[in-house]
Amino acid sequence: MSGKAANLALITIAQVLALSLWFSGTAAGPGMAREALGVGPGFQAFLTGAVQAGFVAGTLLSAVLVLADRYDPRRLFAAAALLGAAANAAILLLPVGDAAVIAARLVTGAALAGVYPVGMKLAAGWADRGDTGLVVGLLVGGLTLGSASPHLVNALGGLEWRWTLGAASLAAVAAAGLIGLARLGPRHTAMPGLKAAAALQLWRNRGTRLATLGYLGHMWELYAMWAWVGLYLAASFAAWRGGARLDAREAALATFAVIGAGAIGCVVAGRVADRVGRVRVTVWAMGASAACCLLAGAAFGLHPALTTSLCLVWGVAVVADSAQFSASVAELSEPGLTGTMLTVQNCLGFALTLVTIHLMPVLVSHAGWGGAFAVLAIGPALGCVAMLRLGRSPMALRLAGGRG
């Protein structure tokens, strides 16, 4: 298929379809828990956490072997999507609650290491100097909307979990077929052969190092916020009503709106960053997000409309800058290593999320919601410092067509 718009549409649709494997476990968890005795919140947490852990392991292996830059990314994407589809579908043959289910989700996450960063590399190959932020923003916006979708499914009463997993596997198979129709963009570059320690270039290059430090500050907060904002809203609504029993669908719908709103933020921030600079947009977004972290405690227990309004702003700000860190690394990387640099960046960021997601319940129990979210504000605050340093360096001239 020829044409920039058509190829970017194919890549984006394929990415969203394949990433449905990631979200399906979250959507299927409640149904699995209702069906099997002894399957509780701990098992559901493992369903999600196993994908994150698998993704970290997969990105680490991919980065060491420089897979994203040595091979045709379309074939790597398709093979990874098919592997993920098979691992996800295998759950349908396993006893509910069996340890093998968690292992299958781990393999699914590892397979997605060949989908998410590779899809960004494919998209970056079609980006011009003036629209890299928007192009990558579209992909991250798709991920954000997908992350919100299980909350909408559960708010509407949920789906039979086998249908959820089966549909996700079929979507990933369709993604493998679609990506084969896409062409490599004019800015695509490949690295011939295996380059020793190529993955370490992310840290040796000062520009990609600072952009990644900014990304780590962003990721310190992002997935912990996504994982816990639903419980925060439910507890806040209940507190406002004096502890009265809450319709779970109300909090689920609010959570879907809060996380889903970030998809709009990704696209808008991408367009703005291409025009005014990536450093400014990431600092603005992280500053707003850190402020929301600090205000969340004061908003707890207020009228649901007020608390939800704050969280909607937070939902936009917390992910609006995500694509711009990836766009920055793509622009600052050595030609032929873009895929590997994006893979390493993803590996580090998602490894950090494993810490903050599991740290949150400890913080909530000891410091309450306000104290827990205040700790999350540390990440974007430090991320701002890293991006401001990048903005003052000569390497900023390579960002957003010289806009920094």
Image (cartoon, rainbow, N blue to C red):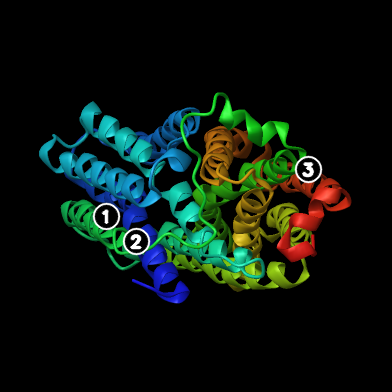
Write down the residue under mark 2: 14
Name of the residue lying farthest toward the front: 192
Query: Separation of disc 1 and disc 2 at Cα?
Result: 7 Å
Query: Separation of disc 2 and disc 3 at Cα?
Result: 34 Å
Q: Give the quarter of the image for residue 146.
A: bottom left
Write down the residue under mark 3: 382
- 104 displayed left or right of 378: left
- As rendered, which of 76 and 31 lies closer to the eye? 76
- As rendered, which of 160 and 235 lies closer to the eye? 160
Residue type at the position of mark 2 = Ala
Do residues under tags 1 and 2 come within 8 Å of each other at their CB atoms? yes
Residue type at the position of mark 3 = Leu
The answer to whether one can see residue 265 in this image is: yes
Query: Separation of disc 3 and disc 1 at Cα?
Result: 38 Å
Q: Residues within 10 Å of mark 1 (few under 14, many from 20)?
A: many
State the SS at label 2: helix
Question: How far across and down, in percent of the image, does residue 222 sit?
Answer: 59, 49
Write down the residue under mark 1: 176
Residue 48, above or below 61: below
Residue 77, above or below 61: below
Q: Residues within 10 Å of mark 2 (few under 14, many from 20)?
A: many
> Mark 1 or mark 2: which comes first in sequence?
2
Question: How far across and down, in percent of the image, does residue 162 sit?
Answer: 16, 51
- As rendered, which of 256 and 53 lies closer to the eye? 53
Do residues under tags 2 and 3 come within 8 Å of each other at their CB atoms? no
Question: How far across and down, in percent of the image, does residue 292 sit?
Answer: 71, 58
Name of the residue lying farthest toward the right: 392
Name the image quarter holding the N terminus. Answer: bottom left
Q: Give the quarter of the image for residue 98.
A: top left
State the SS at label 3: helix
